[in-house]
Amino acid sequence: MRAPDGSPKARIGDVLLAVEDVSLAFGGVKAISGVSFDIRQGEIRAIIGPNGAGKTSMLNVINGFYHPQQGRITFKGRTRSRMRPYEAASGGIARTFQNVALFRGMSALDNIMAGRTLKMHVNFFWQVFRHGPAVREEVEHRRFVEEIIDFLKIQDIRRTPVGRLPYGLQKRVELGRALAMEPELLLLDEPMAGMNLEEKEDMSRFILDVNEYYGTTIALIEHDMGVVMDLSDRVVVLDHGIKIADGTPDEVKRNQAVIDAYLGVAH
Ligand SMILES: Nc1ncnc2c1ncn2[C@@H]1O[C@H](COP(=O)(O)OP(=O)(O)OP(=O)(O)O)[C@@H](O)[C@H]1O
């Protein structure tokens, strides 16, 4: 994304997360082979590629669901051969899923509140008696959650069980739950999948707003090329688990290996 004068936005800073030479296999299936790239503070970074390219596997490596057989992940200056899910979450990495993963019987408000639990410090004793520090802390968390609800413009459905909401709104609630963790890095797995045009436009706006208003760094997987090119500062392209290109949307669009991969040319 560019500033109105065409220069890259000053909001983009140092490397927040670096993936170095990561390989991941499931039995004989090589999902990722020797992939390296970085994500800079404040940027919107897209990971794209044809079906089975290894995109979701890469997100799962970044937030610790999968442990790579080879390579390193450096997040906020700390290098690990494997990220653990709780380290990722408590260190500031939040994530949404390709298929909405919410508590369907619970309200939008309670789902977002659930994302806040990681931030709660008061011990069980105080929580049980809903007393003193527990009440104070809950009031503060509720205020933060209400701010997210206003930000995502979902005030009128805050009490509705999410299972009854249209898909686009469920995705928005899921985004709200991730934001409740106050992540430094937000991973979005196909945030527009299954959405109509209007829902896609809304979600694009919210992703840009999250990035600008909260200053959150975002890495996203998305199949809609128009969305990817509009939203992203930089794009990394995977094909059959290998990185075939990395650059600005314009650079990637013109890259012959990318064009071939999308047209299905054998290589
Ligand atoms: N849990 C798993 N067990 C076995 N193989 C897996 C597993 N997860 C992914 N794979 C394989 O790893 C490769 C990469 O899959 P991945 O889901 O990461 O690709 P993707 O780029 O996200 O694809 P899509 O766009 O279709 O979601 C594929 O060949 C897939 O079949």
Image (cartoon, rainbow, N blue to C red):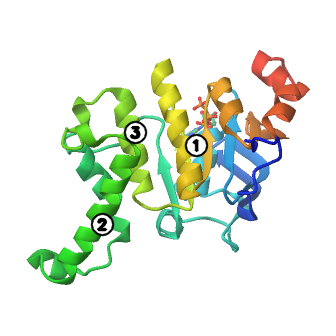
Three-letter residue code for mark 3: Arg
Disc 2 or 3, which lies upstream in sequence? 2
Q: How far is mark 2 from mark 3, CA to CA? A: 19 Å
What residue does disc 3 label? 172
**Residue sitting at x 76%, y 42%:** 2
Q: Describe residue 99's horizontal placement relative to residue 143 as left or right.
A: right
Q: Does mark 3's beta carbon lie closer than 8 Å to ligand 1?
A: no
Few, some or many C-alpha atoms within 10 Å of disc 3 (few <14, some 14-19, many ≥20)?
A: many
Of 143 and 221, the residue lying toward us:
143
224 with respect to 200 (left or right) = right
Q: Is residue 195 visible?
A: no
**Figure quadrant of the C terminus:** top right
Closer to the camera, 260 or 134? Answer: 134
Separation of marks 2 and 1 at Cα, in angstroms? 24 Å
- SS under mark 1: helix
182 up-or-down from 148: above or below: below
The structure residue drawn at horizontal position 27% and vertical position 30%, both measured from the top left corner, is: 165
Gap between marks 3 and 1 measured at Cα:
13 Å
Residue 9's place in the image compared with 169, above or below, is below
- Residue type, mark 1 in image: Leu
Label 2 beta carbon within 8 A of ligand 1: no
Q: Quadrant of the N terminus?
A: top right
Find disc 1 in the rendering and name its residue: 208
Q: Which residue is mark 2?
A: 141
Mark 3 near mark 1, Cβ–Cβ under 8 Å? Answer: no
**Left or right of 133 in this view: 50:** right
Question: What amino acid does circle 2 point to?
Answer: His
How many numbered markers are drawn? 3
Which mark is nearer the camera, 3 or 1?
A: 1
Q: Quadrant of residue 103?
A: top left
In the image, residue 85 lies at what x, y percent? 49, 62
